[in-house]
Amino acid sequence: MAEYKRKKRPSRGRRKRRRQRNRRLLITLLCIGGIILIACLGFFIVQRARAKEEARKASLMDPLAGAPPLDVELLTPNEYSRPELALEEVKNVAIHYTANPGSTAMDNRNYFENLKESHETKASSHFIVGLEGEIVQCIPTAEMSYATNERNVDTLSIECCHPDETGQFTDATYQSVVHLTAWLCSRFSLDPSKNVIRHYDVTGKECPRYYVQNPEAWEQMKKDIQKQMKTISRTS
Ligand SMILES: [Zn+2]
């Protein structure tokens, strides 16, 4: 009969040493893993900061980066619609509706222009968004407009055209006002959830009517502006 040697169990001391060796190996591997993770995280943070800085520099060099097409039709300086007062800080963008169903962006721009002759009232807006989504700029963003009462001093104003009495914007107007506001928020480092306001939020006036009567549509607009901002920061 063949003899089988009984395999000898390692001694208790060797087993202990082996456990210690395994533990050290595990700790070393965990440390290396941790260092790699921290290095990757650091690299990711630096890359993000660099991309943000580049986007900021690009927008400084080209203030129109990410802007929708603008038809710049500045008003003649006059005390009734373009007083040429400096807007020292931009803290808000205010959305309005024209309250004149079916009127075009240029109709409204020309109404503001004619105030220099008619002296009927003091009124204007930085931008007017038309029924086809066209955007007419009436006042440079460095100057004050007469649209948002006590917030004129630190607010950019956008008037929106609308086809009927409900005050709801057409799809084209909606897309343009969202794009325009998102670009302004990016350019002036504003947060749409706090800094995009309705005329109603300043004076209680029912303006813009549809977005006062339908608060959920207003909340949705601010979300759409936020979403649009992300595409602007990626492309600029
Ligand atoms: Zn208004």
Image (cartoon, helix red, strand yellow):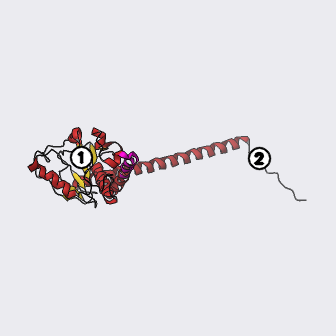
Mark drawn on residue 156: 1
Residue 217 part of the magenta-drawn span: yes
* CB atoms of marks 2 and 1 within 8 Å: no
Please tell me which residue lies in front, 21 or 68.
68
Q: Name the residue at 36% across, 46% down.
A: 213
Q: Name the residue at 73% across, 41% down.
A: 12
Disc 2 CB within 8 Å of nearest ligand 1 atom = no
Secondary element under disc 1, as helix, strand or loop, is strand
Please tell me which residue lies in front, 57 or 91.
91
Q: Is residue 40 above or below residue 201?
A: below
Residue of label 2: 9
Q: Is residue 7 visible?
A: yes
Residue 230 part of the magenta-drawn span: no
Dot 2 or dot 1, earlier in sequence: 2
Residue 11: x %, y % from top left? 74, 43
Residue 112: x %, y % from top left? 16, 51
Q: Name the residue at 48% across, 47% down.
A: 35
Gap in Å between the C-alphas at discs 2 and 1?
A: 83 Å
Q: Quadrant of residue 200?
A: top left
Callout 1 crowding tier (Cα within 10 Å): few <14, some 14–19, many ≥20: many
Q: Is residue 67 above or below residue 21?
A: below
* Range drawn in magenta: 213-224
Q: Quadrant of residue 92?
A: top left
- The type of residue carrying mark 2 is Arg
- The type of residue carrying mark 1 is Leu
Mark toward the viewer: 2 or 1: 1
Q: Is residue 89 visible?
A: no
Residue 77: x %, y % from top left? 10, 49
